[in-house]
Structures are given as structure tokens and as C-alpha cells.
Amino acid sequence: YESRVEQRDYLAFNTASGKGAGSTKALQDPAFRDAIGYAIDQKAIVDRAYRGHADPGVGIVMPVAADYYSDLSDIRRRFDLAEAGRRLDAAGYRDTNGDGVREDKEGKSLQLELITGKASGVSEIPIAAVQLVAGWLGQIGIPVSVTQLDSGALTARTTAPTDGGGSWDLLIASNWLSSSPHDLLVLGSSKSIGLTNRSYWTNEKFDALLTEVDRTVDLKRSQELVDQAARLIYAEAPYIILSHPLTLGAYRKDCFQGWGPEDAISDWSYFPFDRLRPI
């Protein structure tokens, strides 16, 4: 069987300024990050890296969170390398000397380091997904070097800049929390920088929406707040959500009864194992 779970695979930009910042101020520019979003083909990642066993990423809310999920169809970016190039040009990131590499606004050639690695508590991201992302960025004039790290080194590099983290450019990693409204939005929380917020992005309006979500019990109002926050962080693009991998498994219907809906299996509950009975 295949089960949808709460994992989010993402490309994060190091948006820090000052201590822990990346190699170029372009990473702090929402227009630069937005343009990169047009160079990422989530469907190709699902088809080629996951062999179909994933859902393509859109916003920070994953499909299994049915009460809050939206495909953001009215603002969703579509894969288009030419459009990515046009947006980079318009934002001031051009290849002015014709060497095939774009320069930032300080006139420095862009050469980005992408770090990745296997973290505990999540399903591993196929290296093919990393290679695809690096390849697409290279095609639009942004060379990328990939650094593969073990879990400890990855945690150390992505901890808060105040604790010695940072000084990387791009990160491909995963997050697997519950589908509660708070956990859906924690990727953008300024209180979680270096923990679940590994882009180091801060936004006062987003934080205010998260605070209101945390004290809201009405489902409809909670849905409205989550949607506002999801749209805000999508537009600012500190993350590009790549995919939501499916969990694959098998079970014995001839030995046990009580198996429930496949999508209900989660690391955040004992279901369905708390209600199985031997036949």
C-alpha cells in the first residue's frame, strides 16, 4: 500500500543577513527566490527521483492535511526555465560578460553551495532530486556545487547563526511534523530559526498569523489564517517545496483485521496498530 504522510521535502534559501549569511545577498531577495521557483519541476522530481511514489510540492501545507491543503492554483508557479531567466533578468541578476554565469547586484558571479544529507526521523531524499535541482539552476546560469553531509554535520551547519550555523547558500532537506495548524506553519516561525525554520527567514506578519492560529479553536477561522500564512510564505519563497514522499508498506489481511484507511497511517499516532485483531 501507499500512504500519504506529513513529510515535506524542500529547497531552502539561506535568507540570513550578517552573521551566518550565504555567499551572496541575492539569497535575501524575494524576487531572486521567486525566479528560482520557476526553475524547479516538482512533477519531474516525483516521476524521476521518486518513481511516482510522492506528491509534487506546492505550498507548505501537505496534501494529507486535508482540512488545510490548497494547491494555490491562482498563484502557483509553473516550471518554465525561460520564465525563470526573464525574472532573474528583471530582478537585476544578469550574465553581463557572456560567460554563461549570472552576476549578483554587487557584480560577483553567482556560485552557490547546496548542502544536503540524511536527517533522523524523516524518509531519505533521493540524490536524484538533488541532482535535478542543481541541473536546472545550472541551466539558468547559476552554477551549484553539492555538499553531502551526515546527520550531525547537517544539523550543525543549519543551526541558528547565533549558535554558529549558516554560511551556506541552499539546503535540500525534509521536515516531518504533525498536520496541526501550528506544525504546518512552523517552517516560517522566527521562534524556530535553526530548528524547524532552517531558512532563517523572519516576517512579522507571518509570526502574527501563527500567533493567532495558536489561540484559535474555530476550524473555519483557523483555515483562513493558515491559508493567509501559506500564501505569504509562498510569495516570499524562503522555501520551494519539492515533494511529499509516500510511505510504502505491506500488511497481512489474512492474519489481522481492522486495517483502516491507508492515508491515516502516521508517525504521530499508533493507528491502525492500536485496533488490529488477529484472525
Image (cartoon, grey):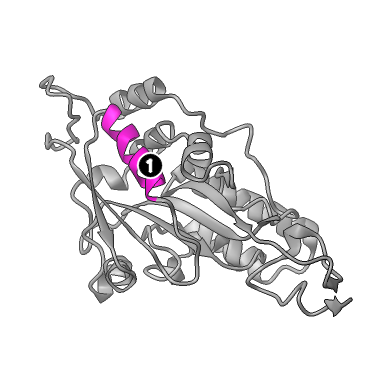
45 horizontally vs 92: left or right: right
Q: Position of residue 154 (x, y in %)?
A: 31, 67
Q: In which quarter of the image is the C terminus?
A: bottom right
Q: Picture coordinates of residue 40 (x, y %)? A: 43, 36
| Residue 60 can be seen in this image | no
Q: Which of 279 and 237 is in front in this view?
A: 279
Q: Residue at x 72, y 60 (%)?
A: 222
Count of residue discs: 1
Locate residue 183 relative to residue 166 in the image: left or right: right
Q: Which amino acid does label 1 sit on?
A: Pro
- Of the 4 image quadrants, the one containing the N terminus is bottom right
Left or right, residue 166 beside residue 70:
left
* Bounds of the magenta segment: 127-139
The residue indicated by pointer 1 is 30
Residue 256 appears anywhere in the view:
yes
Tell me what residue is drawn at x 67 percent, y 44 percent. 70
Residue 137 among those drawn in magenta: yes
Classify 94 as above or below 175: above
Q: Report the magenta stretch's main SS.
A: helix
